[in-house]
Amino acid sequence: MRKTLTLFTAAVLLTGTALAGPAVARDRSDRSDRPELTANQMADQAAARAAQLKADLRLTPEQDKNWPAFEVAVVDMWKNQTQQRLAWRAAHARQQDNVDLIDEMRKEADAQIDRSNERKKLADASQPLYNGLDDQQKRRFSAALFRRD
C-alpha cells in the first residue's frame, strides 16, 4: 500500500511538472513580447499599488492619519527600485562581452546599501500605521508589501 501511494504521488508530481513546464516557458516568452514600461508608467504603477493597498486595508479615520508618511516612503521605494531596474537594463543593453567583475561587485554593493536604507526609511514610516492596524489588516499589509513582482 505504501509503495502504491509513493508511486502515485510521484506520478502526480511528474505530471504536474510536465504540464507546468510549457506554461512557464510560454509565460517567459510572453514577457519578452511585451513593450518595456517607461519610468512614468512604472511610477504610476507604484502609486496605484499604494492606492490599492490603502483600499484593501479599509483604514479607519484614526488609522488614516498615519497613511501619508507611509505612502510617501513606499512609493519612493518602489520608484527607486524601478529606476534601478531601468538603469540596470540600459547598462546591460549597452554592454557587450566587456564586463568588469570588480566594478559590477561594487555597483551591486552600492545598490544593496541603497535598498537597505530605503527599507529602514520604510520601516520607520510604517511603524505608526502598522501599530494601529488590527490583526486582519496586518496580514493584508504584510502580504501586499512583501510580495515579489
Image: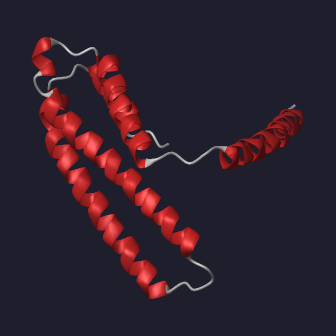
Q: Quadrant of residue 87?
A: bottom left
Residue lying at 31% horizontally and 58% vertically, measured from the top left: 115
Q: How many marks?
A: 0
In the depicted view, which residue is nearer to us: 58 or 48? 48
Q: Quadrant of the N terminus?
A: top right
In the depicted view, which residue is nearer to us: 67 or 41? 41
Q: Is residue 148 above or below residue 138?
A: below
Using residue 72 as the reference point, say whether residue 142 is left or right of it: right
Q: Return the x and y of residue 23 as percentages of the image width and height.
A: 77, 39
Q: Return the x and y of residue 72 as percentages of the image width and height.
A: 20, 39
Using residue 79 as the reference point, say whether residue 66 is left or right of it: left
Residue lying at 35% horizontally and 18% vertically, measured from the top left: 56
Q: Return the x and y of residue 47 as percentages of the image width and height.
A: 33, 33
Residue lying at 43% horizontally and 40% vertically, measured from the top left: 41
In the depicted view, which residue is nearer to us: 131 or 77? 77
Q: Is residue 25 above or below residue 94?
A: above
Q: Quadrant of residue 13?
A: top right
Residue lying at 28% horizontally and 63% vertically, measured from the top left: 114
Q: Return the x and y of residue 24 as percentages of the image width and height.
A: 73, 43
Q: Which coloring applies here?
A: secondary structure
